[in-house]
Amino acid sequence: MLGLVFAVARALLPSIAREYVNRTLDRNLLYEGRVGDVEIHLLRGAYSIHDLHISQRTGNVPVPLLAAKEVDFAIQWKALLHGRVVGQFVMLEPELNFVAGSDQNESQTGSGGPWLEMIQDLFPFTINSAVIQDGSVHFRAYQSQKPVDVYLSHLNATIDDLSNIRDQTNPLVATVQASAMVMDQAKLELKMTLDPFSYRPTFHLALRLLGLDVTKLNDLALAFGKFDFKRGWFDLVLEADAKEGQLTGYVKPLFRNLKVFSLAQDIKEDTVLQFFWQALAGGTTSVFKNLSRDQFGTLIPFTGGASGSTTTDILATIGNVLRNAFVRAYLPRLEVDQATEQDFQFEVPSFIEELSTTASEGQ
């Protein structure tokens, strides 16, 4: 008799769990959520949610904020060796969509949603680690003449030691590592250490992108900058430190083999104002580029405080444009954290150098 009761309860458990998950996701006033099937894995203390879908309740945004093929919540058994009952979640093929619009009804940022509370309601244990497999992140805009979609694909990320189960003495106990492809073509890598228990943000972040074909950003450049790229490669390095809410860091954008203005092409395709704007942009990058590397770039230092405002040093940025052009070209490597620099395994792909050389010789 007891076995029959257990069998019936086990059969009903997935539908009960699915109803609870859908009810939890639907409590948000700004976003609505739903899931497909729910699977229960009693032996490993886990359950899986299939076909997660979260979207705005109001407005005119045609894509969901978040969609995922599967989300798996499980007890992290190895943590029991340290006397802690914590969990981890794994998200398979998630897609995150940020949308820029002319007003709130046409924008989507994800702000205002109690996402941490929602995760706590869906899983009763402290989350110690998270894994993202084959995800994507999109920045979209639908109000321009041609819809904009700038995206990361093949995103894989891990977040470890969020609950500090080993009682490490190092205050930066949690680690984040991520890699992705930008526009399916250039590799992006990120490494981060942080103190998840700090009242104010405390972290170190290093990010690097190498070898992006700038013509893949033309929809974005036309929509927000009123110009386009004829050719070129883009590298980006970012490093930031935050200690008790005080932020310092820099961004290093570098353009190689760049061409913005083409007299024959732009005079046919552009309006008068856009033509002169492209000519100005092209002339500026030509004058202030490093000739030996055929590179236009700078280093932009920034600082921020606990209030959330961030400021940049304009004079230093201009000076660094001149330094890159006439003193010594910046390289796409970290300026401060040499230990992290050694962890990045970036090399300029040979096909990029070959294409750059070919393009130069053809002009």
Image: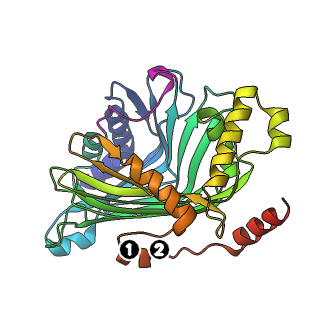
Is 338 drawn above or below residue 199 in the view shown? below
The number of numbered badges drawn on the structure is 2
Where disc 2 sits, the SS reads loop
Q: Which mark is residue 98?
A: none
Label 2 with label 1: CB-CB less than 8 Å: yes
- The one of 76 and 246 positioned closer to us in this rendering: 246
Q: Amino acid at mark 2?
A: Phe
Is 23 drawn above or below residue 254 in the view shown? above
Q: Which mark is residue 340?
A: 1
- Label 2 Cα neighbours within 10 Å, binned few <14 / some 14-19 / many ≥20: some
Q: Which mark is residue 344?
A: 2
- The one of 140 and 263 positioned closer to us in this rendering: 263
- Label 1 Cα neighbours within 10 Å, binned few <14 / some 14-19 / many ≥20: some
Q: Is residue 61 magenta?
A: no
Q: Amino acid at mark 1?
A: Thr
Where disc 1 sits, the SS reads helix
Point out residue 340 in the picture as x, y percentages from the top left corner. Answer: 38, 74
Point out residue 27 in the picture as x, y percentages from the top left corner. Answer: 31, 29
Q: For the magenta stretch, what is the residue range?
A: 102-114
